[in-house]
Image (cartoon, rainbow, N blue to C red):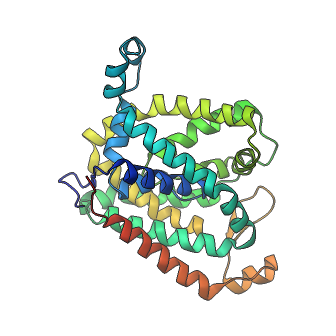
């Protein structure tokens, strides 16, 4: 799979391939700091995904009277198969990731920091140096600024879940920003993971409604930006991804409840938290995460 002239990898996988990519996106969005959009981008389905989502709008309503046209115009086969894969990924890994983050946090962060670091290399290597020097630096500063973003800790109301979903799904569409990290920063990640584990339908419905609104409002804008400002946007996102890597530092603790992150050495983490640092294993998992992302970026397209 080679990137075309605009530098965005493109693939046309079979339904099985789309399900597999959807599962990777679902897994990614379960983990704060890892973007499902990055997985879509690297695996070559990003242009198809954004293009399909951008077709929805006011004109879709009268088209409902013509089901076959509605199905074809919105590429619903692709979207539904991808959604099925994402659903499987979330359901299969939500509780697993919750357990791993609670008991082996340094190893989880190490693996996915390797994934994101390699994403910077894979996406950034095709960018124009002049654009990277301008937009990439701006993105880097924005990504680093997330280190000082505090989270809300009070029990969220459903309207806040709705707004959080709208914002998070915008992040999900970007090949750099994690929707689950946005939820984490807003203090909504734990309630959402708990709702997924316990099938809290009111909370999940509020989240889904917010996501639907966010998609309708943001997909067209993103498609337009990709058409007209591809290099600037992708350079900005490359820098943002690089700036977001410290947010996945394996040995991190909040300064206080609801506070910003403190990035520690393995020894300081073990002393402060009373938990093992797993330093050698973390280095190995960082390398494995980077290798896994690189292998994914090299996947050949199945037709």
Q: Nearer the viewer, residue 286 or 200?
A: 200
Query: Which part of the image, by quadrant, shows the N terminus?
Result: bottom left
Give coordinates of residue 223: x percent, y percent: 33, 37
Left or right: 154 as drawn, with respect to 86: right
Give coordinates of residue 142: x percent, y percent: 50, 55
The vertical placement of 143 against 87, above or below, is below
Give coordinates of residue 136: x percent, y percent: 37, 58
Q: Nearer the viewer, residue 227 or 263?
A: 227
Residue 103: quadrant of the picture: bottom right
Residue appearing at x 73%, y 79% in the figure: 269
Residue appearing at x 35%, y 14% in the figure: 66
Left or right: 197 as drawn, with respect to 240: right
Residue appearing at x 28%, y 66% in the figure: 125
Q: Please indicate, yes or no, whether residue 38 appears anywhere in the rendered image.
A: no
The vertical placement of 20 against 168, above or below, is below
Residue 254: quadrant of the picture: bottom right
Left or right: 69 as drawn, with respect to 108: left
Residue appearing at x 54%, y 31% in the figure: 212
Left or right: 153 as drawn, with respect to 12: right
């Amino acid at each position: 799979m080679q990137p075309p002239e605009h530098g965005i990898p493109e693939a046309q996988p079979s339904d099985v391939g789309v399900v597999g990519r959807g599962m990777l996106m679902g897994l990614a969005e379960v983990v704060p700091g890892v973007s499902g959009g990055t997985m879509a981008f690297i695996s070559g389905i990003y242009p198809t995904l954004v293009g399909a989502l951008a077709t929805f709008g006011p004109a879709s309503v009268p088209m409902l009277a013509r089901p076959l046209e509605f199905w074809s115009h919105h590429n619903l086969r692709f979207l539904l198969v991808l959604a099925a894969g994402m659903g499987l990924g979330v359901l299969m890994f939500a509780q697993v990731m919750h357990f791993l983050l609670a008991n082996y946090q340094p190893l989880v962060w190490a693996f996915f920091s390797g994934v994101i670091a390699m994403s910077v290399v894979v996406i950034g290597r095709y960018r124009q140096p002049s654009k990277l020097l301008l937009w990439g630096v701006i993105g880097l500063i924005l990504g680093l600024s997330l280190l000082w973003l505090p989270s809300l800790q009070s029990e969220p109301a459903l309207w806040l879940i709705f707004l959080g979903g709208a914002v998070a799904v915008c992040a999900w569409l970007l090949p750099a920003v994690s929707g689950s990290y946005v939820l984490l920063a807003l203090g909504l990640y734990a309630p959402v993971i708990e709702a997924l584990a316990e099938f809290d339908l009111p909370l999940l419905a509020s989240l889904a409604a917010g996501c639907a609104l966010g998609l309708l409002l943001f997909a067209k804008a993103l498609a337009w930006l990709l058409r007209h400002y591809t290099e600037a946007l992708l350079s900005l996102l490359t820098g943002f991804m690089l700036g977001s890597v410290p947010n996945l530092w394996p040995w991190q603790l909040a300064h206080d409840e609801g506070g910003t992150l403190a990035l520690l050495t393995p020894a300081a983490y073990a002393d402060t938290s009373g938990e093992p640092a797993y330093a050698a294993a973390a280095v190995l998992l960082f390398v494995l995460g980077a290798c896994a992302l690189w292998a994914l970026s090299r996947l050949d397209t199945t037709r």
